[in-house]
Image: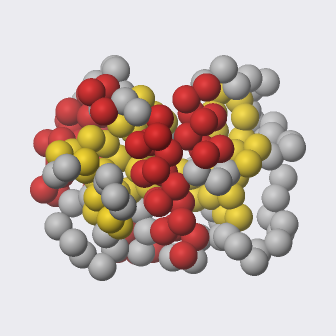
Amino acid sequence: MGCRNSIQTARLQLDPVSWADLEDVVRLKASAGVTGRLAGGICNRVLSEQDMMTDLMTWGREGVGMFAVRQQGHFIGLAGVQPSSTEPECHELQFAILPHARDTALSREATSMALAFAHAGGVGRVISYVRENDIVGRQVFGGAGMSICDARPASCSADILLYHSMRPGMGTAGMH
């Protein structure tokens, strides 16, 4: 696709999601076998279309958002950021990879690139919620450069960890 917001690595191509990705996104979001953390979880076509509209509006409004992730030209998942519904003034990093491409290294690579893009685009703080026993999620977010916050929001249950990343040079303002 190759727009100015695309990211190319040795193994992956990340492009901002578009309506051309809708069928792939619908299949991804309907699959119970997906590895990853999307805020909406498993959903039907109508919810996937609504999510796509939100993704497109976020790209247009903020210049950051969700990427369609491809390996050798084939759609394998999503990675990117959305404005957080729980933490003002920050974004939430999310990813989802199809079962046939389930590879922690690929997930980590995609989320790492999406996180770096968000910070370069001006997003100061990025968060992710992960269950303590979710080893894959912890490996992906930790490997992407996020760290566990010492304190977790009161709204989180005891088994939820809050990961975060601050844009380089921001200091610790706004941390829990």
Q: Is residue 46 visible?
A: no
Q: Nearer the viewer, residue 22 or 143?
A: 143
x and y percent of residue 40 in the render? 42, 36
The residue that appears at 63% across and 34% down in the rendered structure is 138
Relative vertical location of residue 115 with respect to residue 152 in this rendering, above or below: below
Residue 36 lies in quadrant? top left
The residue that appears at 54% across and 76% down in the rendered structure is 120
Residue 89 lies in quadrant? bottom right
The residue that appears at 17% across and 45% down in the rendered structure is 74
Relative vertical location of residue 146 with respect to residue 151 in this rendering, above or below: below
x and y percent of residue 88 in the render? 67, 60
Q: Is residue 158 visible?
A: yes
Quarter that holds the N terminus: bottom left
Relative vertical location of residue 26 with respect to residue 135 in this rendering, above or below: below
Q: Is residue 100 left or right of residue 85?
A: left
The residue that appears at 82% across and 58% down in the rendered structure is 175
Q: Is residue 159 left or right of residue 26?
A: right
Question: Which residue is the extreme one toward the front?
Answer: 10
Q: Nearer the viewer, residue 42 or 15?
A: 15
Q: Is residue 55 left or right of residue 132?
A: left
x and y percent of residue 41 in the render? 42, 31
Q: Nearer the viewer, residue 128 or 155?
A: 128
x and y percent of residue 10 in the render? 34, 58
Residue 23 lies in quadrant? top left
